[in-house]
Structure formats: C-alpha cells, structure tokens
Amino acid sequence: MDNITELLTFAINNGAEQVLISAGSPPVMRQKGELVFAKMDALTPENARTLIASALTSDQMKELEDERELNFTCRMTEDHQVLASAYFERGGISAVFRIVPPAVPLPTKLGLPSLMADAARASEGLLVIAAPPGHGKSTALASLVELINAEREATVLTIEERIGYPHVNKKSVVHQREVGRDTPSFSSALDAAMAQDPDVVVIDPMKDAGAVRRVLALAGRGRLVIASMEADYALEALEKLLDAAEDKDSPSVRRQLAASLILVAAIRLLPRKGGGGRVPATELLLVNAELAGLIRAGDLKALAKHMTSPEETGTWTMDSFILKLHERDLVDDEAVRRYLVDTSALES
C-alpha cells in the first residue's frame, strides 16, 4: 500500500476516528476509542515515509523535512476531511490522521449537559470549554456553534488553530478563520474582530495572555464568546484564565472575568463499558452572583469548596459525574479508578 487515500478510505468506511502511521508497526486505526491493528506486515521506515508523503505536496514535504513536524489537512471527499500531524521519530516519519465526521453533532447527540446549550444561547458573556488533548473540546465547540447556527440569526466568527468542522450557513452566518492561513495569530484575529462586529466569537484554543485579555474585552462589549482551553477540570481552567492574564492579583482582571463568565465546562471522555465508544463525563461551574463575588475576590479556595455544592446550583465535580456514570453501568471499575481524583469514593 503506497497511497494514503486507499488506507483512509478504508478507515472512513469502517467508522474509524484516527489512523496512526509509524515504522515498525502496521497501520493502526482507532475505532470507538479502541486501537485496531491492520492485518498486514509492519511498515518499514521507507513504507511509512512513502505513505505519509503521498498525502503531502512537495512544498509541504519540504516544510516537514525542514521543521521536523507539520500539521495539515486532507480532504478525502466532499463530506470527509482529515486533520493530520506528521513528525519525525527516531529518524523516520510518523503521522496521525484524525477523521472529521461529515456532520457536526448537536450537544444532545454528544451527551453534553443541557446547561452547556443554555449558555450558548446567551446573547453575551464568556463560555469556556476545557479538556485535555483528545477529549473532545473542539467537537464540543463545533457542536455549540451548530446549535447557534440552527436556532438563531447571528453572525458567528470562529478563530481556529485548524478548521476541523466546516459549517454551512443555516439561520446564522458563520465565518471561519484558520490561524496561519487566514490570519497570522489569534491576537491579530481578535483585534480585527472588534471591527467586524460579530454577535458570537469562537476561539479554539485560547492559549496566551494576549488572547485572554482580548476575549475578556469582547465578552464585556456585548458579544458571546465561546473559547476552548487545555485543562482537566473547571477550577483549573479558571485558575489558568487568571494566570494567563498575567496579573491574576489585579482587581480589574478579576472584575472583568466575574462580570462576563457564564459557565466553565470541563470534559473527559471515558471508555464505555463493554466497548462501543466513549462516554463524556463533565464538570460544570455555573457562575451565579455568589460565585462572581468569589471570582472578584480571587478566592479560589472558596470556589473549590463550592464545587461540592448540590447539582441544583448548576455546579458539580468530575468525580460526582463519573460516579453517576458508574451507577448507571456506563463505565466500569477500571475506568472509574483511572479518572477519579478521590478513589476512596468508589469504596464507599
């Protein structure tokens, strides 16, 4: 097999989410969260290089050889595109190809809490989606954009590291900008957004201090801002937001955040019991007047204590949600022990 198209077509037809290429192993597909090795000989370094090179232009291949890593996009069909990352490993070339589903699922289809959809229906403020790499934050973000697109008239501007889910205008008009191709940086695109007057701004991901400051400014000027960031838990995401603003002790930063923050939602994808994919576990921090006061005061200890409040407040911990998944027999003991912070809760 010398051409990646044949392999990716096979993967798409078999419902794979990823294809991994590296020397010393046959191609590997990730299906419903599980790794499946292709029934063929292990790839030699030359085989792996040939397969990966078949997905690249000559300019891209040169960039890969110069930079030793490259992110790129392949469009397989009108419905399917593939986000890929190639890199050098032990002197050879490896790659991960992530297959993007043809349709953007709505939040209910993904199993996300209704509070996330409710927050996306707000006319202004800040909604933060947090997750570790590979745990669905970009998919969740795209799902919320699709919800807005389906339900209301709005202009939506997305600023993305890589466009994974192309949106087709429905009730909304969705403009998608990719950093590096359509704009030099997140900060530059956010500066331009001030003049473009969108109703909704989506940032995937929000990383640096400049982006955080601009996001807070936009959210404070009557826009809804939905942003993703890398964090395991909601409180960790909130602390990172304050840290990224470079002056977490500044009352002005805390006031801005307290005034604009609607919800912080953290997501972890756990293997479903008995196979058949993964199930989302969530941790939510819904900001009310009490929590806004704690954010203004910078009292993270009190916020952590609040995370154990009853669910009626719109706030719950990842541990409590995982235990409920376990009670519903959706995840097994092994998954619970792997993802729980306080494993003693499983014994009680």
Image: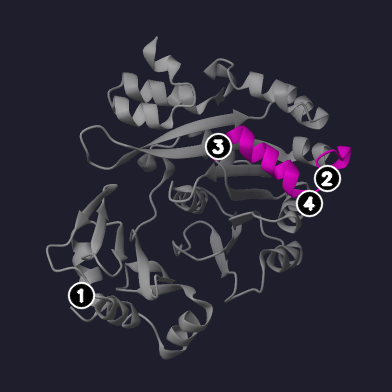
* Position of the N terminus by quadrant: bottom left
| Whether residue 114 can be seen here | yes
Q: What residue type is labelled 4?
A: Ala
Q: Give the numbered dot on residue 344.
A: none
Examine the structure image and report whether residue 246 is included in the region drawn in magenta. yes
Sequence-first disc among 1 and 2: 1
Q: Which residue lies furthest to the right in this view?
A: 251
Sequence-first disc among 3 and 4: 4
Q: How crowded is mark 2: few (under 14 residues within 10 Å), some or many (20 or more)?
A: few
Distance Cα–Cα, label 3 vs label 2: 23 Å
Q: Is mark 3 on a helix, strand or loop?
A: strand
Estimate the x, y position of residue 95 in percent, counting from the top left. Answer: 36, 69
The magenta region covers 232-252
Residue with the mark numbered 2:
247
Q: Which amino acid does label 3 sit on?
A: Ala
Q: Give the numbered dot on residue 217.
A: 4
Distance Cα–Cα, label 3 vs label 4: 21 Å
Q: Is mark 1 on a helix, strand or loop?
A: helix
